[in-house]
Amino acid sequence: MNYIFLIFFIFFLEIADCHSTICSIDTSIYKNNIKKFLSKHSIDEPYDRMIQFESCNLEIVYINQSTGRVFKLDSLASNAFFKMKEAAMLDSVEFNIISAYRSFNHQVKIIERKLKSGKSMESILKENTLPGYSQHHTGNAIDLSQKSVNYLSESFDKTNEFKWLVNNADKYGFYLTYPKNNQKGIMYEPWHWVYIHNVD
Ligand SMILES: [Zn+2]
C-alpha cells in the first residue's frame, strides 16, 4: 500500500516539475549567489524587484549562423514564439532575435566586464539588470529588432515590426514589460517582450 502511494507521489512530483519553470532544488543556492554578488559589490537588496529564477526547461529557438550564438527560451515561451513568428511571416513581418535566455552567471559576466572597462556600477545598472532579477533568466523574455538590425534601439517603435507586435503579440501571450512611462520607472524598452503563460 505504502509502495503504491510512493509511486504515486513520485509521479506527482514529476508532473509538478514538468510544469514548473523554477529549478526548485537550486532555489536556496540561487538566492545565496544573488546575496554574494550584492555584498561583493556593496549593493543593497532591491526591495522593489522580484527574484527571477532560471528556466530548467530550455529549447533552442534560433542559432545565428554567422556568430554561432545560440538563443534559447523556456519551452512554453518557445512554442508561443514560433506560433507568433509564423503568423508574423504571413503578414511579411520578420524579426531578429537580439537576446533571449540569459543565465545568472552570464549576467554577472556582462556586469563585471563593464566594471573592468572602467564603467561605474551606477551607470551599468541603468542599462543592465542585477543578476538574479532579469526576466531573461526565466527564458520567457525576448529582445527583438527588425530582421537585419543587430542592435537594440528605441527607434524600433517606429517600425512595422513593432506595430505588428503591438497589434498581435498578446494573442500569443507576449507583452511589453517596460512600456513608455512605466510605473516601475524603468527605461522604455520597445524591444523587450515577455511571455506570460495563461494558466486557464
Ligand atoms: Zn530584454
Image (cartoon, grey):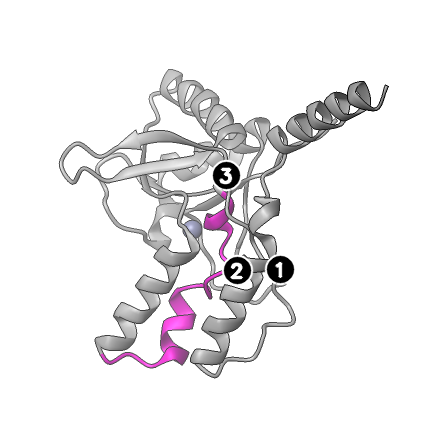
What number of labels is visible? Answer: 3
Pointers 2 and 1 in contact (C-beta within 8 Å): yes
Dot 2 alpha-carbon crowd within 10 angstroms: few under 14, some 14 to 19, many 20 or more: some
Residue that badge 3 annotates? 56
Q: Rounded to the nearest whole Å, what is the CA distance between mark 3 and mark 1?
A: 18 Å
Ranked by sequence position, the earlier of labels 3 and 1 is: 1
Dot 3 alpha-carbon crowd within 10 angstroms: few under 14, some 14 to 19, many 20 or more: some
Q: Position of residue 104 (x, y in %)?
A: 43, 56
Say what amino acid the circle numbered 2 marks.
Answer: Tyr
Image quarter where the C terminus lies is top right
Magenta region, residue range: 118-138
Q: Residue at x 58, y 39 (%)?
A: 21
User: Which mark is on residue 133?
Assistant: 2
Ranked by sequence position, the earlier of labels 2 and 3 is: 3
Q: Quadrant of residue 88?
A: top left
Say what amino acid the circle numbered 1 marks.
Answer: Met
User: Which mark is on residue 50?
Assistant: 1
Say what amino acid the circle numbered 3 marks.
Answer: Cys
